[in-house]
Image (cartoon, rainbow, N blue to C red):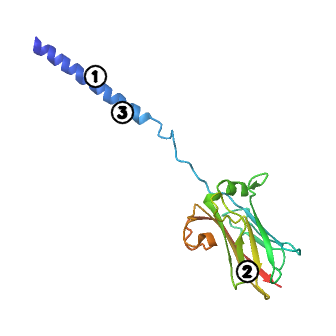
Amino acid sequence: MIIKNLKLETMKTIKILAFILCTSALITSCSNDDDNPPPVNEEEVITTLTATLTPVGGGTEITLQTRDLDGDGPNPPVITVSGPLAVGTTYNGSLELLNETETPAELINTEILGEDDEHQFFFQSTNSIATFTYSDTDGDGNPLGLEFTLTTAGSAGSGNITIILRHELDKNATGVSDGDITNAGGDTDIQTSFTVMLQ
């Protein structure tokens, strides 16, 4: 009789343990793994970049613009330069970036400023036609590039000016604070080249 009761108690214990194991497995498998999903840092959609160059001391304002309303579609971007740059002149530059797939167009500058520690513009020129200096910084004092100065060479000529926006880059890498993109890393949000004349 004692052995029979012992067997019954053992079977009850096994059944209870099996129930507990099945229940906890079910609870675990049904738990919501997305309670704290990692934040998604989506790339900005940029259809239009406009650089406005205003000569220090007066003169003709120049705009450089790239506009690509179909993004990765078949149509190439429309690139325009409003006129030649003056020889030996310093221009105050500012950039406006838009997402024109939205109505009204979304100003991407706001997002860039909100994540300024993760963004930086880089400026390059061919034929030594221009040099660039950052006029703005992020919250940590590192260059940003929505505002800049451009100084043209002292003699007439032509070449390309390239503007690149990188995000999630290493702003502490060698040369980055001086505008050298070589060690910056990160991803390119937009890159475009403008053919310009110096007169």
Say whether disc 2 or disc 1 marks the residue closer to the N-terminus.
1
Between residue 91 and residue 81, name the one nearer to us. 91
Distance Cα–Cα, label 2 vs label 1: 80 Å
Which residue shows up at 13% across the image and 14% down it? 4
- Left or right: where 12 falls relative to 190: left
Which residue shows up at 71% across the image and 78% down it? 131
Q: Nearer the viewer, mark 2 or mark 1?
A: 2
Q: Are marks 2 and 1 in contact (CB under 8 Å)?
A: no
Q: Position of residue 15 (x, y in %)?
A: 26, 23
Q: Are marks 3 and 1 in contact (CB under 8 Å)?
A: no
Instruction: Please tell me the numbered disc located at residue 130.
Output: 2
Is label 2 in a helix, a strand or a loop? strand
Say above or below: 80 vs 187: below
Identified by mark 2, the residue type is Ala
Instruction: Please tell me the numbered disc located at residue 16.
Output: 1
Q: Which residue is mark 3?
A: 25
Q: Position of residue 143 (x, y in %)?
A: 66, 65
Q: Are marks 3 and 2 in contact (CB under 8 Å)?
A: no
- Kindly indicate the quadrant of the structure image that contains residue 1: top left
Identified by mark 1, the residue type is Ile
Q: Position of residue 125 (x, y in %)?
A: 69, 79
